[in-house]
Amino acid sequence: MTTSPLVVKAAAAMTGEIARLTRDNGKSVEIDPVQVLDRSDSLPLREPGLVSPNGSCRLIEARDGWIAVNLPRPDDAELVPAWTFGEMEEDPWAAIAKAAGSETTRDFIARGAELGLAVAQLGEIKASSWRALSLRSALARPAPVKTRLKVVDLSTLWAGPLCGGILAAAGHDVVKAESRTRPDPVASATPLLDRRLNGAKRRMGIDFDRSGLMDLLAGCDILITSARPRAFEALDVTPDRLFAANPALIWVAVTGHGWSGEAAFRTGFGDDAAVAGGLVDWQGGLPRFAGDAVADPLTGLAAAIAAIEAAQAGGGRMIDAALSRTAAGVAALR
């Protein structure tokens, strides 16, 4: 399967930086920049075009621009009639393509996002760098630098687990904590990928409630998450609370569109987030996906770099690793 040379170039720069940073800490992590982008041993993938390699996301020409629509979850297609103001059809893509020309792209995307669908306009996010935002907590109190860190990985899918896998490869103690009722689907859907991402971690099932999470995070040096802010707000497990309890904490928050701001509520996955960042190839005047969900592995690499740098500085950081912003930073390398 073809991946854009720009994406491979960016991955090579990131993996080179990871090797340098971890070498300074005593255990160099060498990552193949092509292999880290590749899930072809785990999924049947097609060549990227107007349809993503995994088949769940499509580029659709709307009234005033191109949009990406991702329907990876079983319930997503059921939301399409509410989005398009139409009847349930056998082919939801036909309904989306028809409705996309009836109103402004911005309004169409906004309504889909409110329903929880992963939708984005091509190039809507701009960034000058692929680096994750590293924000110093107002409660930060840096701790002495440790050679072996306790990492709790609550993330699922690809980007967050890749970050945790890199930290495990660097010699840190990484616990992959999963909901007993909703474990990471990667384990059952793509076991080979799961082994690469999570094989070096200790796994445990937990109940996702406030007391259980607070107990788990006691003494944690790095926390990796991939849920949106409102999920933690509902549990009252907020940055202020966690940094008050542990001022040297490093919280790596992987999201589709960022931890703060108007887009923080939006759903985002690797393919649609890449499109949001303008990370596509153009062929014959038409956009094409730049590879397989490329915003995911690129963000996992960027998040790992930010986490390692924060640890070397003593912690007390919130790492805001947004898929769409990472993609936009890579697109800006053109």
Image (cartoon, rainbow, N blue to C red):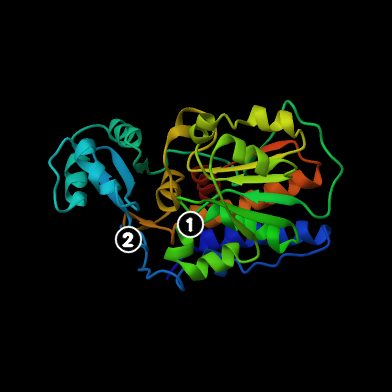
Q: CA distance from mark 1 to mark 2?
A: 14 Å
Q: Which residue corresponds to the image point at 23% horizontal and 45% vertical from the top-left?
A: 78
Q: Is residue 327 left or right of residue 98?
A: right
23 versus 227 height, above or below: below
Q: Amino acid at mark 1?
A: Val
Q: Nearer the viewer, mark 1 or mark 2?
A: 2
Q: Secondary structure at mark 2?
A: loop
Q: Quadrant of the N terminus?
A: bottom left
Write down the residue under mark 2: 55
Describe the element under mark 1 as helix, strand or loop: loop
Disc assigned to residue 67: none
For mark 1, what is the residue?
294
User: 197 and 110: which one is in front?
Assistant: 197
Quadrant of residue 19 in the image?
bottom right
10 Å neighbourhood of mark 1: few (<14), some, or many (≥20)? many
Residue 323: x and y, percent?
51, 46
- In the image, is 140 to the left or to the right of 74? right
Q: Residues within 10 Å of mark 2 (few under 14, many from 20)?
A: some
Identify residue type, mark 2. Answer: Gly
Which is more N-terminal, label 2 or label 1? 2
